[in-house]
Image (cartoon, rainbow, N blue to C red):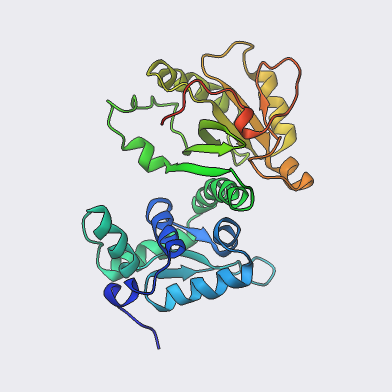
Amino acid sequence: MTLRGPMHALGQLTDRDHAILDWLYDHKIMTTAQLARALFPSLDTAQDRLRKLYLLGLLDRGRMYREGGGKHSWRYMLDQDGWAIVAAYRGDDPPPRRDKIRTRNLRLVQSPKTEHLLGVNSFFTDLAGYARTHDGAELRRWWSEAQIAGLSPVTLATPGPLARPDGHGIFTDAGRTVAFFLEYDTGTEPLQKLVDKVDGYAMLHRSGLRWPVLFWLHSSAREQNLHRRLPAILRAAVATAARDRAARVGETPADALWLVHGERTGRRVQLVEVPCGNVPQ
């Protein structure tokens, strides 16, 4: 039997459960594998707990068939009761009706744009997973595109038309900390469009936020071609890494994958070694 009601569920929630609800409130949708990697000791443990949160009415989920057979893994989103719990302690408006949330979630599961969103979320859940298994490492901040766009101009200069970060994070490892903007590349945009985006970030640098722009690129070949197109001197710091390289060597975005544009040695560095002008306290 499915148990319903946020008050009933509230007394059964762990700190990890609250983290899941918070992340889905801000970042909309995640896969079982992403949540397992970031927060759980094993995939089986994650599957069991996510199913419990689903039966409590806190999470909704959906998945699609793979072309050629089989199904994708579950994609989890907030259901109304989970939304209500987060909204209540944040002091936000109550959630929409359950039917509206279910319609929104159905669109999320099926939308082609969701693959990009899941890619961005995977970058950050990989960092969270690294922090979970490495003493002294921490994903201190993870902001979505919407959270960045909604900031007060007093806090952050409104991005220009070419600077719309896919995410912002602050990451610490081995006593070093880096703040950054993320550009997640699917490999479909012309390279020149990526080059043009860098100028848009110059305004953020002038506002005092001298955070590097990380291009998490589709392939190593695309990474090489992007560096050839970028001017030698940039008004915003840029570092790049390629997902195919990360998969090949079994590393995460925290590891020594990053090539800082203009660095003459060509040495790849860990994320926390990417130069960063200032880090929020």
Does 96 sit above or below residue 230?
below
Name, please, the residue furthest toward the top: 233
Question: Which quadrant, please, contains the C terminus?
Answer: top left
Q: Please report the residue visible at 47 percent of the width from the left and 42 percent of the height from the top.
A: 140
Question: Which quadrant, please, contains the N terminus?
Answer: bottom left
Is 69 displayed left or right of 19 in the figure? right
Q: Could you say where residue 80 lies in the image, as x and y percent from the top left?
A: 31, 68
Q: Nearer the viewer, residue 5 or 27?
A: 5
Q: Could you say where residue 101 lies in the image, as x and y percent from the top left?
A: 33, 65
Q: Could you say where residue 127 lies in the image, as x and y percent from the top left?
A: 58, 46
Q: Please report the residue visible at 42 percent of the width from the left and 42 percent of the height from the top.
A: 143
Does 147 sit above or below residue 192?
below
Q: Please report the residue visible at 26 percent of the width from the left and 57 percent of the height from the top.
A: 89
Q: Let me know if residue 214 appears in the view.
A: yes
**Which of the 4 quarters of the picture holds residue 42?**
bottom right
Q: Nearer the viewer, residue 235 or 113?
A: 235
Name, please, the residue furthest toward the bottom: 1
Does 140 sit above or below residue 133?
above
**Which of the 4 quarters of the picture holds residue 58?**
bottom left
Does 177 sit above or below residue 200?
below
Is 88 displayed left or right of 123 in the figure? left
Q: Nearer the viewer, residue 185 or 11?
A: 11
Q: Please report the residue visible at 62 percent of the width from the left and 48 percent of the height from the top.
A: 130
